[in-house]
Image: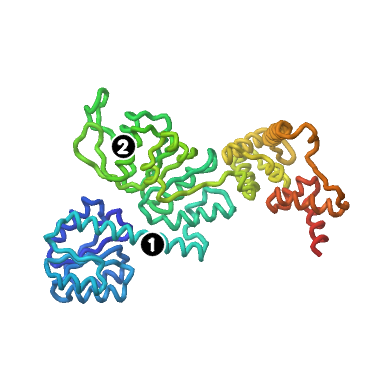
Amino acid sequence: MNGNYPANPVLLVDDEPGYLRVLQALLQDGKIDHTVCCTDSRQVLELIGKKTFSLVVLDLIMPHISGYALLSHLVENHPEIPVIIVTGLDQVEAAVSCIKAGALDYFVKTDDPERLISRIKQALAASELRHELDNLKSNLLEPALHSPQAFRQIITRNQRMQNIFSYIEATGSSSEPVLISGESGVGKELAARAVHAVSRPEQPWVAINVAGLDDAVFSDTLFGHVRGSFTGAEAERAGVIEKAGRGTLFFDEIGDLSLPSQIKLLRLIQEGEYFPLGSDRPKYCQARFVFSTNTDLNQKIAAKGFRKDLYYRLQTHQIIIPPLRDRIDDLPLLIAHFAHEAADKLGKKIPPLPETLAAACAGYSFPGNIRELRGMVYDAVSRHQFGPLTLHPIQGAISEETNLQQQKTEVQSAPDDETRIHFPDELPTLKEGTEQLIAEALKRSRGNLTMAAHRLGITRQALGQRLKRKNG
């Protein structure tokens, strides 16, 4: 059966086809629908040699090759694959022997099937966690991305962003929810699309913005409804869960979801099943959940505006996108990208981009982040007529922000504190003062020579020559 969970199938081995069908149905009811059945024990080793399996459920008494022999081979040659024995042999000695030989657990076919399914789920969860840890270790040792095309829409060379890409790849095989947080305009949806491109690229992508949705609209949007379920429901309508199928379901602005809707979402994540409005037949959710928020959910929890139990379920995997002011090394790339994009859409020639442009922007905090920068670049390109591109909107914003900061400083400063520079009793020499000024400019520019030179009012080449003379 070709299903969705787990990513690598569960191998069911038993010489009784009838029992395999029953076990497969039980697993499917438990939302474990990616299984491979084998009734001939001679084929097991060949199957494992060709395909990666998450788990093996193995009978003991079979013709040709016994379950004991297969267990010994698997433990010795494939220790990464857990093995659970499910057999009709109800003997304590057999159970003890199998556990000593390396089996994860031992069940008799007449045992409670819910215990078996629960144990298989635990084993799969543990195996998935080990796989994620192995991926994280691998990405730390080998930081090169395996799927760089999944991140092509995110323009960056920032190391923190590269670390986020590696984390997304490392957790790509997980079916657990992902919570993406960050300020407005940092590109949370692009990160969510990257999660989808890494984990389920061939499956549907469905997005829903939950901000402003009341509970009734949210329920109908999420679960859908059957005909006649309420006044005006003249036809059956599928919800976004059904539309997402085995793909990714993205909830934007999850921090704004109402408390009644939070309860329904928590139940959906925990149980994996839902009822369309007006229906008494359950349907099963197989999509992966990705959430984003620009609010501090811990603060909302403290203010009784967000459920703590839901928060813990959302943030199994958590990604925090840094604001643009912490990614100033991306400014040259972003400005060039948006200038080319704007010129192409507006049907204009690409204007020359002066080297000092990014340095001039570095003094601004960009409260609207990348979205704000994009709007400013588009505006500048649309107004541009000749000569190098200038970003007057940014320069105006910088001036306004600087004035506000100065006013704040004046209010906070003592009345006799009329200068921002404080000298010691013994004045530094002109050379020492110059070196201190350069060091401060480099510190404020995080080591970026172009931006430091702009702050000092000199060219990058002049600053480079001064540093060379100082160091040599």
Q: Is residue 284 above or below residue 85?
A: above
The residue pinned by badge 1 equals 131
> Which residue is drawn at the image coordinates 50% and 59% (left, top)?
145
Along the viewing direction, whichever of 103 and 216 lies nearer the viewer = 103
Q: Is residue 384 visible?
A: no
- Residue 428 spot, x, y in % from top left: 86, 51
- Write the residue at 81% across / 48% down: 458
Q: Do we see residue 186 in this rendering?
A: yes
Q: Disc 1 and disc 2: Cα gap in Å? A: 31 Å
Judged left or right of residue 344, residue 13 is: left
Q: Is residue 413 left or right of residue 289?
A: right
Badge 1 local density, few (<14 within 10 Å), some, or many (20+)?
some
Residue ID at (53%, 40%): 183
| Of 193 and 339, the residue lying toward us | 193
Residue 277: quadrant of the picture: top left
* x then y, percent, for residue 17: 13, 63
Secondary structure type for disc 1: helix
Which quadrant holds residue 55? bottom left
Name the residue tied to disc 2.
264
